[in-house]
Amino acid sequence: MRTVEEHVDTILSSLPTLESIELAVLDAQGLLCGEEVVSSTMLPAFDHSSIDGYAVRRADLKNASPDEPAHLPVVAEAEPGSREQRNVSPGSAIRIFPGALLPGGADAIVPLAWTDRGVARVNVVRCPPAGAYIRRAGEDVQPGDTAVNVGTPIGPAQVGLLAAVGRVRVQARPRPRVTVLSIGSELVDVGTTPEPGELVDVNSFALSAAARDAGGAVYRAGSVPANRDRLMSTLEAQLLRTDLLILSGGFASGSFDVVSECLSELGQVEYSRVAMQPGMPQGFGVIGEREVPVICLPNDPVSALVSFEVFARPAIRHMLGKKRLFRPMTKAAATEHLNSPAGRKQFRRGLLMRHPDGGYVVSPVGGAGAHLLFSMAQANCLIVIPEDVTEVTEGANVSVMPLVLGS
Amino acid sequence: MRTVEEHVDTILSSLPTLESIELAVLDAQGLLCGEEVVSSTMLPAFDHSSIDGYAVRRADLKNASPDEPAHLPVVAEAEPGSREQRNVSPGSAIRIFPGALLPGGADAIVPLAWTDRGVARVNVVRCPPAGAYIRRAGEDVQPGDTAVNVGTPIGPAQVGLLAAVGRVRVQARPRPRVTVLSIGSELVDVGTTPEPGELVDVNSFALSAAARDAGGAVYRAGSVPANRDRLMSTLEAQLLRTDLLILSGGFASGSFDVVSECLSELGQVEYSRVAMQPGMPQGFGVIGEREVPVICLPNDPVSALVSFEVFARPAIRHMLGKKRLFRPMTKAAATEHLNSPAGRKQFRRGLLMRHPDGGYVVSPVGGAGAHLLFSMAQANCLIVIPEDVTEVTEGANVSVMPLVLGS
C-alpha cells in the first residue's frame, strides 16, 4: 500500500509540460503568461493633461491671487484625440481636457476650480506647482520595460496592460484538455430511467464539473461499458485530442481485466492501493503515442470526487503551470468525536463554520459510505485525519480542506 | 459629495433580479440553483453490493472459522448492470461485484479476503455482520427529498447529485449579460498604432476581464467616440441584449455634455462626486425600456479598475444572487508611512505578503497616479484607508482587500 503523498508524487512527476500557445488577450485571462512581454512603446505615449483645466506658463501666474487674478486670453482648446500639437505663447492659456496632448510651452495645468472658467479670457487665482496635472510620456512604462513576465497570472490588470502595450495576442500556458470518461456496464446516461441493476452515470458529470473548476478545458465523454472494443475505440479517439484522461470505475474484478488489458495495450498504467478512505483503489499511467497521462479513479461518486480533489486537481493545476497546486488547509475544532481507520488517511465530508468567538468549527456530514452523494453536496470541506490518528476527541483541532471559496 | 457606501447602496438597491432560466446541468456550474429540486426516485435505486465478494445467507456461516470454513456452492454471478434478480437459496452463495443487484435472500456480502476466492465452490472463514457491504435502496435519498435547494451554489457535487436524481437540465440564476463600452474620441483599438494624442482603448479589455471574473457573461463592445449619433446607436443596440451596461470615460467637460445628453434621453442617470481616491467621478442610472442599469466609471485605467472593484463587482454578484457581494478584507501591517487625503476613502495598490512571524504585511506599489497601470498589474491587493485617516505610520495595521486568490 502506498501513501497518498507517494501517489501524488508519482502523478505530478510524470505530467508533461504543455507548450505555450498564442491566444487573444481576453482568452488568456486566468492563465499564466508564457512569454516575457516587453513594451516597445512609452506609456503614456505623450505628455498630456490629467484634468479639465487650462494649460499655462507658470511665469505668467507668478503673482496670481484671489484679489489680483491673472488675466489670460484663451487662444485655443486642446481636446483628447486631437493630433494637433498646439503651443501656449507667453501671456496666454489653452483650455485643455483630460488626455489631451500637452501644448508646447505649457509647464502646468490650472484646475477649473482656480479659475472663472472663462471661454475667451480666463482669470486665474493661483499659480500651480511646476508640472501640476501633467502626465509625462513614459512615466508608467518605458520602451524595453517588461510589462508582463513569464509565469505571471493574467488577470484584469494584466489584460489591460497587454492592450496598453499594443498586444492583441499573447503566448500563454494553455488549459489542459481533459477528457472525463466513466466505465461500467451498469451505467446509463442521465435522462433515461434506469432499470433495476442500472445506475445513472453520475461521475462523468461531477468529475467534468470538478475538472473545469480546477482549470481544465473539459470534454465529458460520458460512459462506456466494460467492453474491450467499445473501450478501446473510445480511448483511441480521445488520445488524439486530449492532454489528460480521467477515468472512473473499472476497478471491480468483473471489469478490471477488460480495463487493465485495454490500458496496458496502449501504454503503462500502474494500479495501487492507496492508504486513504475513501478511495483506496487508484491508478495512474501514460498511454498512447502522445504519452497522455491517465488518472484512474474509483467508481463510487464520493470516492471519485474525493480522489479527484486529492490527485487530479493538483495534476490539472500543475499542467496549467500554477505554483499553488493544493488547496489551502485550515484548522478547526471538531464538534463531535471522530473515528478514523488506522493506517489510512481519512477524508471526511464536513461542514466548516465560523465560531462566534473566532476561529472555525467543523462537523462531519453524513455517514462514511462512499455512495452518499447527498452528504457530499451538503459538505463545504473535507476533514483530513492523518494515517496514525484513529480518534479525534470532541473539541480537538483537525485539519480541514475547504472546497468552496465563498458563495 | 457622497460616500463610497452611499454610492454602493444606490447601485445595489436599483438592480433588477434576473429570472431563473433553464440550463443544461453542466452549464449551471458556478451559478445558484433557481428551483427546489425534489427527487422522485430513491438513491441508490436498489439494494446492491458495495464490494467484490459473495452474497450469502448468514445462517449458513454461523460457525465459519479459519479452522472450519463453511463450504458453499457458488450458484451464479451477479454482475453490475445485469437486470436479473437472482436468489441465494439456503446453503449456497452468489459471486457478486460492486454495484450489482443484491440477490434475494442474501443478508450480507462476504469480502474476498475472507474466502478462498473459489469459483464453483467457495470456502468462507468468517461470518460477516448482518447487512455487511450491502447498500440499501434509498439510503442516500428518498423520493420527496430535496436534492438541491433554491439558492444553493451548483458545484461539482451538486452537478453529480442533479444527474443522480435524473436531471438533465435545471433552473438556475443566470449570469448577467454585461456590456462593456469605453467612451472617448481619443481612443483607438489595440493593434492600431496610436498617433500622438490618441490612446489605445485599455478599459474595454481590462473591465471585460474584471466583469467576467466577477461572474458576468461579458460582451466587449469596444470604444466609441464622444459623438452623439455613434454613442446613441451603440447604446440602443446594446440595450436590447444586455442586463448591465458598464461605461468608462465621458466625464471630462469636453465629452460630458454628449454622454449625459444621450443617457438622459434614454433614461435617468445621476452623476456624483464620490469621496474616494482614485475614482471621484461616478455615475449610475437606469436606461431604456427594459430599464437596464448603467454604471459609469472614470476614464483612467486605474480609476476604472478600482471603481469596478468597489461598485461594479458587487453589482454583478448581486445580480447573480450571491450572498457575499464584497471581497473578504484582511488586516496587514504597513511596511512604510502612507498618506491619504482627508475626507476621501483611499484605495491604494499594494503588495500583500505573509510575514515570516505570522500575519501579513503590505507595501504600497507605484505612485498615486490613476494612469499607472503597470503598478496596478504589480499589485495583488488594494490598501483601503478610511476617510478620516490622513496618515498611517509604518508598522500600523491597515485594511486590505486581496484581489487575487492564489496563483
Image (tube, coloured by chain):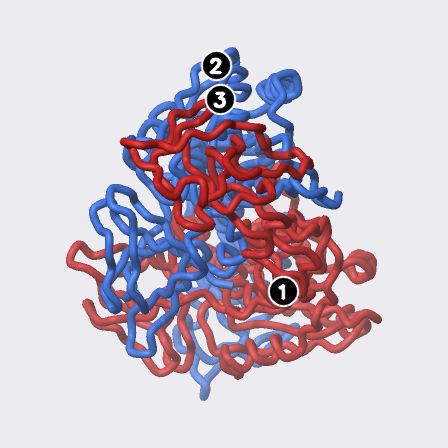
Chain colours: A red, B blue
Which chain is indicated by disc 2?
Answer: B
For label 2, the SS is helix
Report the side of A334 relative to B370 (left or right): left
Q: Nearer the viewer, residue A300 or A42?
A: A42
- Please state which amino acid type lies under the numbered disc 3: Val
- Give the residue at x 66% y 53%: A165
Q: Position of residue B158 (x, y in %)?
A: 48, 46
Q: Is residue A114 above or below residue A378?
A: above
The dot on residue A119 is 3
Local crowd size for mark 2, using a 10 Å CA cut-off: few (<14), some (14–19), many (≥20): some
Look at the image and tell me whether residue A86 can be seen.
yes
Report the side of A391 relative to A52 (left or right): left
Q: Position of residue B35 (x, y in %)?
A: 44, 30
For label 3, the SS is loop
Local crowd size for mark 1, using a 10 Å CA cut-off: few (<14), some (14–19), many (≥20): some
Q: Is residue B248 above or below residue B354?
A: above
